Amino acid sequence: MKRYEAIKVILGSLKDELVICSTGMICKEAFLSRDRPQNFYMLGSMGLASSIGLGLALNTKKKVIVLEGDGALLMNLGILPQVGDSSLKNLLHIILDNGIYGSTGGQPTISKEAVLGNIAIKAGYSKVRLVATLRGIEEAMKTLLKGEGPSFMQVKVEPDNIEGIGRVTLSPEEIRERFIKCIG
Amino acid sequence: MRASIIYQGLKEAGFNFYTGVPCSWLAPLIDILSKNETYIPAVNESVAVGIATGAVLAGKKACVLMQNSGLACCIGTLASLNLTYKIPILLIISLRKGEPEHTIMGKKTLGLLTLFGDEWPLLKEAVVIEEALEA
């Protein structure tokens, strides 16, 4: 399964949920597959999508989804107990795990050595899923969007980028403004 | 200065969401905030800035507390997130400089804020409290 296909299925399963997209390829592929005002494209600040998602989820009743890579999570692993401690019911944390830093040339991460789902369980997430197929994502999304979190879904994807994919063409202010309007 | 005076000022200014990483100088203020407001103890300063930013997106007025050593840890986040997207948060930073581990950062802290002041006029204004707060 390619990351782009996984992102397409994840975003395709959403209604008005808020999504924080991590920097680099995840932003670009989310923008290409299904741009929506509820997507906050984090153009920089690698590793912090989950922190923003946490601050957001604490202050809105809407479901908040964090979409980040294994490299971004490993950069900031302390966020797992931070989320666990918050007992947030409306947070779904999705890790697109390709085992590499895909936006910077494919250097390996250490995600093979770190069983991220197990760490999430120990850190206090209430539901944890590991999926490796598009069908698996569809089924997990149905359960996790309905149920109470904090939830964690690790998606195993191929180390693969879309050749020549463009940047997000919105300015940071545009991203912010239309996102804030969705929260209401 | 008494922590309760700062807390009163924060309330009057409408701040209603707090997070941060502790400093012993700020301990009396963190104590008041933890008892009376939403205060999220963050695992590091960048996470604190990220959490506060998420809260602002959801309509809160957010404040982050940290030591100046922590400012050094989150300056990249402030630049690429808050200054880039123009998402304001209030930083309360203790200006430690006496001890060996604080000497260099203590000398550079205000300069660092001034350096970024061109990008964000608000950063030009700094109230300096160079001592531990009183309970």
Image: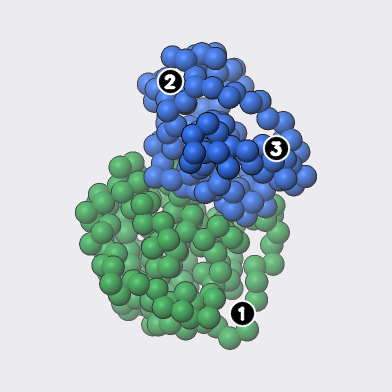
Chain colours: A green, B blue
Give me the disc on residue A165: 1
Q: Position of residue B43 (x, y in %)?
A: 39, 45
Q: Which residue is mark 3?
A: B123
Between B127 and B19, the one nearer to me in the picture: B127
| SS label for mark 1 | loop
Question: In the visual, does A73 lie left or right of B94?
Answer: left
Q: Residue at x 51, y 13 (%)?
A: B2
Mark toward the viewer: 1 or 3: 3
Measure the alpha-carbon separation of dots 2 and 3: 25 Å
At label 2, which amino acid type do we have?
A: Pro
Residue type at the position of mark 3: Leu
State the residue at coordinates (70%, 37%): B123
Give the numbered dot on residue B28.
Answer: 2
Determine the residue located farthest toward the front in the rendered image: B100
Residue A3 visible at all: no
Co-location on one chain, circles 1 and 2: no
Q: Nearer the viewer, residue A35 or B104?
A: B104
Q: Residues within 10 Å of mark 3 (few under 14, many from 20)?
A: some
Q: Residue at x 55, y 38 (%)?
A: B103
Pick whichever of labels 2 and 3 is earlier in the sequence.
Answer: 2
Q: Quadrant of the C terminus of chain A?
A: top right
Q: Chain of mark 2?
A: B
Q: Secondary structure at mark 3?
A: helix
Q: Are marks 1 and 3 on the same chain?
A: no
Quadrant containing the N terminus of chain A is: bottom left
Label 1 to label 2: alpha-carbon separation: 51 Å
- Chain ID, mark 1: A
Q: Residue furthest bottom?
A: A163
